[in-house]
Image (cartoon, rainbow, N blue to C red):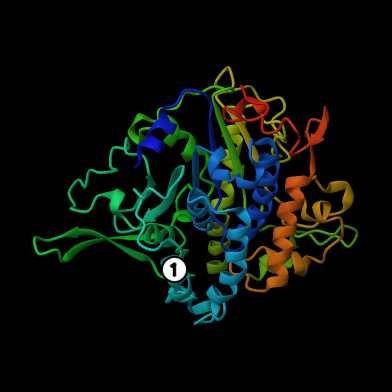
Amino acid sequence: MGAHLRDRFRAPGPKRILALDGGGSRGLLSLGVLAELERHLGERSSDPSKFRLAHYFDLIGGTSTGAIIATTLALEWRVREVVDLYFRLLPAIFARSQVPGPLRLLMPAFKNTALTQALLEYLGDRTLRSQDLKTGLAIHAKRIDTGSAWILVNNAGWRYFDTPGDTEVANADFYLRDLVQGSAAAPTYFNDVRVDLERNARGRVVGHAHFFDGGVSPNNNPALQLLLTATDPAFGFNWPLGEENLLIWSVGTGYVRKRFAKRNRKRRSSAKPVSNFRRMAYSAKVQAAIEGYNHDISQQQITLLQTLSRPRFPWYVNSEIEAQAASPLLSGQPALTYQRFDVRLEIDEPEFRRPEHIETLLGREMKAKDVDKLRQLDIKDTALLEVLYQAGEALGRSHLLDRSGAAAAPAIAPDWPPRSFDPSGWGGAR
């Protein structure tokens, strides 16, 4: 790690973290939000033409598609450059499934080839210690041969950055292309990714780590883990807690909940008919339960982070606690400034829609079958990808309501994120 990052991590003043969810093709939704954020922050910066999100966020972390976006942003890419890459790359990655659905438990649906070639082209031989990384980076993956969730960061103060432990390959020397592909290797979609861990005296590789998508750990939504990473001494950041000290901007890839309900001809809904559930085989019910795993964990993490903060636009968790308006802070005082942004990929009648519903954001009613297509991870249709991106842009520009009904304000307003977090030298900075 270069001295410029060491100094940045240790510099006094507030720190800013960007957390990016996994979600395959739906990463374009995140990029829509980020495009608006980049535009807005660029206008606040001292030099909008040269502004990059890496100049604002001190740590960018992601899982799966979020790891791809996080790495490119940390390499100082513009959001538009990542968007263009996604529109070129996704149709190639998901061009053709090599097996029908029922056989995906026996072999992955897609080959790793297209993503492997793209990551080699754009990331090359850069490692986790690369000087080309202009800000903090955290990549989340699941190591399946040891059953452990890995968080890899480019901080020389991290306990395992340069220490190989019982191997001869330091984590800092892992190729970014391998780490990103491992983080994005979703089970049933892609093969696991093998990363060299150990070499013998002749330099021959004799040990490997096998990685699957970080989404099969609790870190598909990495925001909570990034909070722990930034504050736990083991990772070397040691950033102080406090509402004025730490900002986490968490961006999802689309809220998806698989549910069944009694058919109601008077209400449009994304819920599937109860009759469909009754006809499901036991194995399909098990799969439905497993598919809800990431959703449940993400909702729990959002709930926890909102009880540690006072988000300007609290996420509506469920009908029981709603937006936690009456929930006490677990930490007494806010432990951080936190904001969650995501799009609800579901349809409903106008009186039941919330500001983040896709129909609200796009300003038009949609058919359930069309929204169902947007909920997939392996979208290759450029028209559908464009809808996802537009929904993300609309969310970035939208006016989200405080679910308590007490206030309404634009999601990205002149003072949001708070100007107190602006880097030194900006127009409204300290």
Give the answer, above or below, for where 11 lies relative to 67. above
The x and y percentages for residue 20 are 55, 48
- Residues 96 and 264: in front is 96
Residue farthest right in this picture: 266
Q: Is residue 179 visible?
A: yes
Residue farthest left in this picture: 201
- Is disc 1 placed on a helix, strand or loop? helix
* Residue beneath the point at 57% across and 35% down: 248
Q: Quadrant of residue 412?
A: top right
| In this rendering, position of residue 214 left or right of residue 361 | left
The x and y percentages for residue 268 are 85, 59
| In this rendering, position of residue 408 left or right of residue 374 | right
Report which residue position mark 1 lands on: 121
Q: Quadrant of residue 23?
A: bottom right
- Residues 126 and 216: in front is 126
Give the amino acid type for the residue marked by disc 1 in the picture. Answer: Glu
